[in-house]
Image (cartoon, helix red, strand yellow):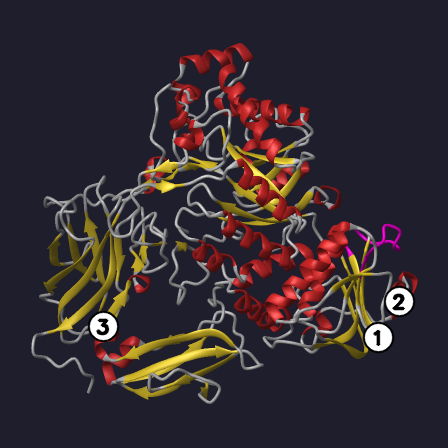
């Protein structure tokens, strides 16, 4: 089919998107194309269908090979790539710079009963069209030949910046792991990989002129090193050859890598390697603590020569026109305390330390501009004067940074916390991976709108796009990165690619099961949190009369929930949940969520309903004491490669409450307690901290009835943290509890600089000899 005929077909065919999203056999496409229309018939792609490279461009051949490789790996459908000007019953890929008007990175895809034609003006557009075609050829988890419905797509991205940030400074990922993530970005039509390579906890990029940056700065000694899975030495770095490999891998998938070298703060690892470039001249250790540290770069000529030399090697490795210099969370106390820095400020006529940071960032921007690059910084770069005119602002403290930047004529990328921070948990119910709260659900990512309403049309043109961030302070492993990222990345991909008017949550959910199948075929450990069944009962009713009304639900409100009452695994023959039902105790309820095609959306969840379990609580079921809403799920060790178990903690107030519970017959409490390493630096948030001073040598757990200042029921001494086990048990009688419903307030009274104590599980127990059965 000629290009002219292709676009005539596109113009004449009925164009649709969401209207067809729920019914069309081709609607497993994520992100949704800008324009999509259907025609009669279909085309069968089988092992005999060639992929024809319809031009003589090496990039077209590379895209054809990538498509063939994906199909072979995921569909077990081997297609041969051949060179030619055209062929019958073939898939033809062609780049045509003279194609009718088409946006940058756009493509046209035409499927007829005679074959498939894909054309684009540029290499990126052809690649994205191949990704769409791959999705059309993998509509289910089957292998082999596939029928593709006749259709016409004209597609282009909404935003230029479609990004994902990976923090490799706090926890290090191998080259293979980074490339695996880049490959998934490509499959989601994302094009900007923001690589966070330096921070207080590690320097991850080889700089040949300064070998100490990686000999010293790339390694730290974990707290409690060598115990309970903690390594004795943690770290790693990417050699320059490895970085070139990753850059080439990304470029082949039309992804630009934007490196971040953080300054003037988050510089502790660099100063540990070269203390002469810090303010004090002292050498700190590479930090093992998460939080905001005081260590800043100096502002003298020697330090800027060091920074320039580092940037020279960075620019030689990364061809990106954007270089990220951080600029966030730079507390200014060291600058304030330094006579030399204060003298420099007076000489420059700078009024305060915020303005000094503005001068610092301006100096970096000028150096990068002289080398044909553009500075990117977090929104704090706006706090001082002298922001480079062409600087791009990444707005993370909400959206105000983007609004201020756009109104001042700066380009902006939306990356707000917590809406696009993927280190936040996805569910406050059944998702047991570590992460911060509140939960950032799949739906909340999907409904995010990057362009702030406060901007007019001219200002909105400065919004380049959006990106999600995966910070890794408490995301230790690549398995955890994948769980945190997918399928929320699908939601983000549609936010930054598809027209805003076409996005509809129900249609997205209808298209998602096929994508989950693609993940399974590629071994991607995605989270099923949006579909995980939640088994809810009225605890106090069940404790009172021995029966429970069970309500089943899932976060997304999508799919069919099937359940069993005998503890067996639900399958397609299990009971279908339609309305709350009543069971007699003891009973074990197991539930799983299924898509319309019968595929599993979420693994089975189970709840045992008996008196012992109704009177037991894990840390997720506890609630904060009044006055502090901070919650975070933690793993046992800061640097152990693990995902389980996890414990909910409040870093600012070590006080938790049991929900109001009917406690008839309860006379004792059993606590599975856990000691964690307290590697959180809260110096700059000390006003939020509630102190609970200890009265015994190592601290104690105190239990109060009904209120945190209510009657004291028990005091349980904590063991010596130096010689004691990380996990231990505490038992105490609960005299004077009385019948009826009560709340218990549990407070760890511990030394301010001591370990962090959390709850594994809390059990309320009847008097010895009393039956735990419900009658």
Determine contact: label 2, label 3, CB under 8 Å: no
Left or right: residue 375 versus residue 560 is: right
Rate crowding at label 3 as few (under 14), some (14 to 19) or many (20 or more) other CA atoms within 10 Å. many
Element type where label 2 sits in the image: loop
Q: Where residue 471 sits: x, y (%)?
A: 46, 47
Q: Is residue 386 above or below residue 183?
A: above
Q: Where residue 39 sits: x, y (%)?
A: 82, 76
Determine contact: label 1, label 2, CB under 8 Å: yes
Image quadrant holding the C terminus, namely: bottom left
Image quadrant holding the N terminus, namely: bottom right
Left or right: residue 752 versus residue 629 is: left
The image quarter containing residue 558 is bottom right
Pointer 3 residue: 615
Q: Which residues are magenta?
A: 93-106
C-alpha distance separating marks 2 and 3:
70 Å
Pointer 2 residue: 1
Q: Where residue 463 sits: x, y (%)?
A: 67, 44
Question: Of the residues tagged 2 and 3, which is closer to the observer?
Answer: 2
């Amino acid at each position: 089919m000629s290009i002219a005929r292709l676009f005539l077909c596109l113009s004449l065919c009925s164009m649709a998107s969401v209207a067809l999203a729920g019914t069309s056999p081709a609607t497993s496409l994520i992100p949704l194309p800008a324009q999509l229309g259907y025609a009669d018939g279909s085309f069968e792609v089988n092992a005999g269908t060639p992929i024809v490279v319809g031009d003589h461009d090496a990039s077209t051949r590379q895209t054809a090979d990538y498509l063939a490789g994906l199909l072979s790996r995921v569909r077990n459908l081997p297609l041969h790539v051949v060179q030619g000007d055209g062929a019958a019953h073939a898939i033809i890929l062609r780049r045509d710079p003279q194609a009718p008007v088409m946006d940058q990175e756009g493509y046209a895809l035409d499927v007829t009963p005679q074959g498939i034609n894909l054309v684009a003006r540029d290499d990126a557009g052809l690649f994205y069209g191949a990704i769409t075609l791959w999705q059309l050829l993998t509509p289910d988890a089957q292998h082999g030949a596939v029928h593709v419905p006749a259709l016409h797509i004209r597609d282009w991205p909404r935003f230029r910046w479609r990004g994902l940030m990976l923090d490799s400074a706090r926890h290090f990922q191998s080259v293979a792991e980074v490339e695996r993530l880049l490959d998934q970005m490509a499959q989601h039509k994302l094009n900007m990989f923001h690589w966070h390579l330096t921070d207080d906890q590690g320097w991850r990029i080889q700089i040949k002129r300064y070998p100490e940056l990686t000999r010293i700065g790339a390694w730290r000694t974990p707290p409690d090193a060598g115990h309970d899975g903690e390594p004795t030495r943690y770290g790693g770095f990417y050699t320059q050859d490895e970085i070139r490999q990753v850059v080439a891998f990304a470029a082949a998938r039309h992804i630009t890598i934007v490196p971040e070298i953080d300054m003037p703060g988050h510089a502790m690892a660099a100063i540990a390697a070269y203390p002469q470039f810090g303010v004090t001249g002292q050498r700190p250790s590479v930090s093992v603590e998460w939080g905001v540290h005081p260590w800043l770069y100096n502002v003298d000529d020697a330090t800027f020569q060091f920074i320039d030399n580092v940037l020279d090697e960075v620019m030689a490795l990364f061809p990106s026109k954007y270089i990220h210099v951080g600029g966030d969370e730079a507390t200014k106390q060291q600058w304030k305390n330094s006579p030399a820095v204060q003298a420099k400020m007076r000489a420059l006529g700078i009024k305060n330390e915020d303005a000094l940071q503005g001068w610092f960032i301006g100096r970096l921007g000028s150096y990068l501009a002289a080398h044909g690059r553009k500075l990117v910084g977090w929104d704090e770069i706006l706090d001082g004067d002298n922001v480079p005119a062409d600087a791009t602002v990444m707005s993370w403290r909400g959206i105000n940074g983007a609004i201020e930047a756009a109104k001042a004529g700066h380009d902006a990328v939306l990356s707000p916390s917590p809406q696009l921070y993927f280190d936040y948990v996805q569910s406050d119910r059944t998702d047991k991976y570590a992460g911060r709260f509140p939960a950032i659900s799949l739906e909340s990512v999907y409904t995010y709108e990057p362009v702030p309403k406060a901007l007019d049309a001219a200002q909105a043109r400065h919004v380049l796009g959006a990106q999600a961030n995966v910070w890794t302070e408490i995301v230790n492993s690549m398995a955890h990165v994948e769980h945190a990222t997918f399928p929320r990345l699908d939601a983000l991909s549609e936010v930054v690619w598809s027209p805003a008017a076409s996005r509809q949550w129900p249609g997205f959910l209808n298209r998602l099961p096929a994508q989950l199948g693609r993940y399974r075929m590629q071994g991607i450990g995605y989270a099923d949190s949006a579909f995980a069944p939640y088994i809810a009962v009225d605890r106090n009713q069940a404790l009172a009369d021995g029966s429970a009304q069970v309500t089943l639900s899932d976060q997304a409100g999508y799919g069919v929930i099937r359940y069993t009452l005998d503890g067996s695994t639900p399958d397609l023959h299990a009971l279908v949940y339609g309305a709350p039902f009543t069971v007699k105790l003891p009973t074990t309820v197991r539930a799983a969520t299924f898509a319309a095609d019968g595929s599993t959306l979420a693994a089975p969840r189970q709840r045992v309903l008996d008196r012992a379990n109704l009177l037991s609580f894990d840390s997720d079921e506890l609630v904060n004491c009044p006055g502090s809403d901070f919650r975070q799920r933690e793993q046992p060790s800061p640097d152990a490669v693990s995902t389980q178990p996890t414990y909910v903690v409040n870093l600012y107030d070590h006080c938790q409450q049991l929900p109001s519970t009917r406690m008839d017959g309860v006379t004792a409490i059993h606590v599975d307690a856990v000691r964690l390493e307290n590697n959180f630096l809260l110096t700059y948030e000390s006003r939020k901290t509630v102190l609970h001073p200890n009265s015994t040598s190592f601290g104690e757990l105190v239990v109060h009835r009904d209120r945190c200042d209510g009657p004291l029921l028990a005091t349980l001494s904590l063991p010596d943290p130096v010689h004691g086990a990380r996990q231990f048990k505490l038992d105490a009688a609960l005299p004077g509890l009385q019948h009826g419903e009560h709340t218990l307030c549990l407070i760890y009274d511990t030394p301010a600089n001591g370990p962090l104590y959390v709850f594994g599980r809390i059990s309320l127990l009847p008097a010895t000899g009393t039956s735990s059965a419900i009658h």
